[in-house]
Image (cartoon, rainbow, N blue to C red):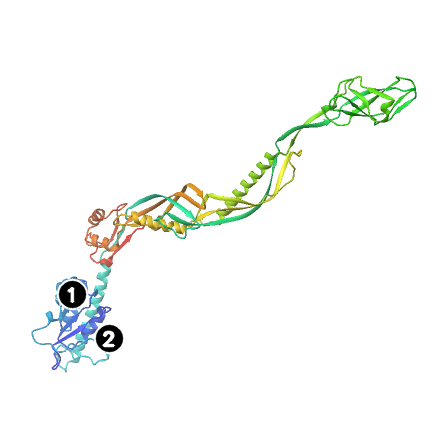
Amino acid sequence: MAEGLPLEQLIYLELDDDLTTIRDKLEHAKAKRVVLVLPDRFKVLANQINCKLLQRYASNLALELVLVTVDGATRSFARAAGLAVYSSVDQGREEVASPEPIREETRPAAAARAPRPPRAAAPVSQPLLTNQVLLSLAALLVLLVLSGALGLFLLPSAEVVVSPASEPILETLAVRASVDFKEASLDRLELPASVVGVALEDSAQTDTTGKKFIPDKKAKGTVVFVNKSLAPVSVPAGTMVSTSSGDRVRFRTLAPANLQAVVWDKARVEVEAVEPGKAGNVPRGTINLVEGPLAVVVGVTNDEDAKGGEDKQVRYVTKEDRARLRDSLTEKLKTAGTEAIRANVKKEDLLLAPTITVTVRRPGDYDKDLDQVADKVSLSRMQVEVSGLVVSGGEMAKMARQLLKSKVKAGYALVPEEIDFKGPANVKFEGGVASFQLTVAGSQRVEISPGQVLGTVRGKTVEAATETLLQSFKLNREPQITLERGFLGRLPLFDFKIQVTVLEQ
């Protein structure tokens, strides 16, 4: 070693230094004995391959290399590679007092310094031999790097897929909903609600149900006029005659009658009842009155029955018809309004159908009067407002999560995407407050982390790893383990060579 160089040099590594950076720092070391101080959580030398590569490189540089680290695994790998390793700087120092530690600078600054003198004693007169040695060392270093990379590639790798077991959670609550409640409360079992409404107008028609008989055809017959004077009498067509007993039934002559100037002279003429209906069917001898001035000089009688008068049955509008029409149209509008509200309510929200009410804004107009003869009656331009209470799905989910979280067992986690609702049931609506039963269904899944799986399967055979996983965790099916390049039939020892997938379903 060149005269005047320090006996020992401390180099403090950085957390992001890699194997190439470490080699570069060793190459520019200024002491025969180099102490590498590793930072916490330094992973580059936490495997035996890198430790062996580093030991060989230090030997080629004729360096006495010492590692200082608190990581137990790194110390084990370093000792196995033939490196001296200590847990503190003081423990690794020689008995001779060391010079002031030299903190290694960044790579660009180190590269700017003059290269250190060659460590191997070689005559100055043999530069060719020195170059050959350096070339050999460089080739060896490249070979070591390639061998290390190939070794990492050829290491076994594995994939482990586990499916945690899950269990259902089912709870039924008796809750209340109102526009006066501002937020969901599991303690009070209250849910906020909003009123959703729609305005509608429509018309409808129905058959009438009232039945009665009305006059239809007029009765006909003949009467005999008798002259009660000594003068001739002319009875014009259209002369009115009638019955005298009970309800008077009037008839009209259909032709003129002429009586000669002889007392009791007679003339027969045809008559027809003034009003249609069966009332005109009168027996003989009942038509005996002549209306008007002719009654003084002329008498009348019917010597045969008047007949042919008929009644017919018709339908007419009743109060019940109107009420039924109004109720049916109201129900029709309620149904249409409910469907319109449902179409506007979000899928996750809950419409409480029993709270739907109909408010009549305009009663509408009937086209027929009461008792009017008609086969149908219509109600037009009836206007209503249909409204009901809607409970927010977000607020229900908030209450459900609070409830289900309180029911989750130790070692399990709630599966939020599997929360569902069943109901409502037994809905009652009074005073603006709806009360009903709501069933909340959810699922809880066993909590398993990839780190737990790694700690269980590392270095085991596929069969042993499978059995250990089944014994250590609650699974809903056997784990799937895929091993590649498993020359010894065992899973890798290194975590980065094991891919763990924890299924969510």
Q: Is disc 2 surrounded by few (<14), some (14 to 19) or many (20+) residues within 10 Å?
A: few
Q: Position of residue 70 (x, y in %)?
A: 16, 65
Q: Is residue 158 left or right of residue 60?
A: right
Q: Position of residue 78 (x, y in %)?
A: 14, 65
Q: Is disc 1 surrounded by few (<14), some (14 to 19) or many (20+) residues within 10 Å?
A: some
Quarter of the image containing the N terminus? bottom left
Q: Disc 2 marks which residue?
A: 107
Q: Amino acid at mark 1?
A: Val
Q: Is residue 220 left or right of residue 377?
A: right
Q: CA distance from mark 2 to mark 1?
A: 25 Å
Q: Quadrant of residue 377?
A: top right
**SS at mark 1 in the image:** loop
Identify the residue shown where x is 17% and y is 75%: 133
Q: Is residue 343 visible?
A: yes
Q: Disc 1 marks which residue?
A: 70
Q: Nearer the viewer, residue 238 or 315?
A: 238
Up the image or down, 203 lies above or below 2; here it is above
**SS at mark 2 in the image:** helix
Q: Quadrant of residue 289?
A: top right
Up the image or down, 86 lies above or below 412; here it is below
Mark 2 or 1, closer to the camera: 1
Q: Nearer the viewer, residue 87 or 295?
A: 295
Q: Is residue 136 visible?
A: no
> Where residue 124 is drawn, which disc sits there?
none
Q: Is residue 111 left or right of residue 282?
A: left
Q: Nearer the viewer, residue 352 or 449?
A: 352
